[in-house]
Amino acid sequence: MSVTVKSASEIELMREAGRLLEIVHDELAKIIRPGISTWEIDHEGERLIRSFGCVPNFLDYNGYPASICVSVNDEVVHGIPKKSRILKEGDIVSLDAGLIYKGFHSDAARTYGVGQISPEAQKLIDVTRECFFKGIAYAKAGCHLHEISAAIGNYAESFGYGVVRDLVGHGIGKSLHEDPQIPNFVQKKRGIRLVPGMTLAIEPMIDAGTWEVEWLDDDWTVVTADGSLSAHYENTVLITDGEPEILTLSH
């Protein structure tokens, strides 16, 4: 495993990549409504990314056909936007987006309710976001990577939720996916010791039912095996000498 430690100048570029991606997410949040197609969300996301002079890092990644992963209800991640997929009142939708700024990647995901959603759906969204913050309490120099994993998994499971095991967070930098892999559930080993300058994409993917998932025939879209709702929350995080710095979240 080769985990990159970023220099001060590289960290500045990653800060800007993160700042711009946060704007993309903030703008996309404003257009989530019943009646919009997932294609329209992707189209606007790509327009925003390119308006900053950046490149959408998901587009054509291993053949992925869009810039924004738009995953609805029981879709966990990597949902492919379509003009025919229309959001409805009561749906939940996860947007996973990333961009490249001057050679450096950022990656972040949010899950939103569409119109009025059930209390159960809102709780899943809220707990998934809270899982991220439980995890980054250990995203500090001197901690071990899998302390993050355990904090996320234990919190989600305390609500009876399933923590997706087939997909994990990851390092990020000059590549979208770098070492290390970051599971969201308890591990047998401690994992690597964290040092300042590491940049990590930490991303709880939490199911209302069991942790098990399946891939659809498009070989991209991941769905819950039991048809339950799934939520996703992710930020790009910098390890420092003190508290972690969330590069894709300023407010």
Image (cartoon, helix red, strand yellow):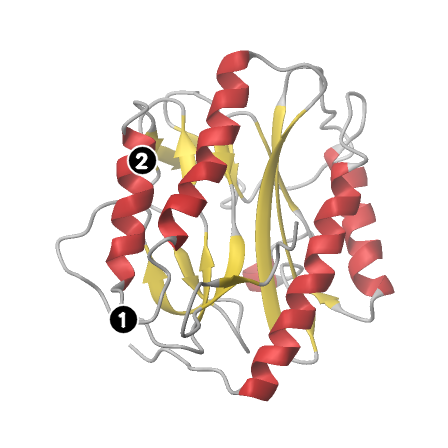
Question: Viewer-proximal residue, 240 or 55?
Answer: 240
Q: Residue at x 62, y 54 (%)?
A: 249
- Mark number displayed over residue 91: none
- The answer to whether the residue labelled 1 contacts the one labelled 2, judged by CB atoms less than 8 Å apart, is no
Q: Can I make out residue 19 in this image?
A: yes
Tell me which label, 1 or 2, sits earlier in the chain.
1
Identify the image quadrant of residue 106. Answer: bottom right
Q: Secondary structure at mark 1?
A: loop
Query: Distance of mark 1 from mark 2, alpha carbons?
Result: 22 Å
Horizontal placement of 184 versus 15: left or right?
left
**In x, y percent, where is residue 232?**
50, 39
- Mark number displayed over residue 155: 2
Q: Residue at x 60, y 70 (%)?
A: 105
| Residue holding disc 1 | 142
**In x, y percent, where is residue 83?**
78, 34
Q: Residues within 10 Å of mark 1 (few under 14, many from 20)?
A: some
The residue type indicated by label 2 comes to Tyr
Number of marks drawn: 2
Q: Residue at x 36, y 65 (%)?
A: 140
**In x, y percent, where is residue 127?**
44, 31
Horizontal placement of 206 versus 211: left or right?
right
Q: Is residue 208 above or below residue 97?
A: above
Q: Can I make out residue 230 in this image?
A: no
Identify the image quadrant of residue 240. Answer: bottom left
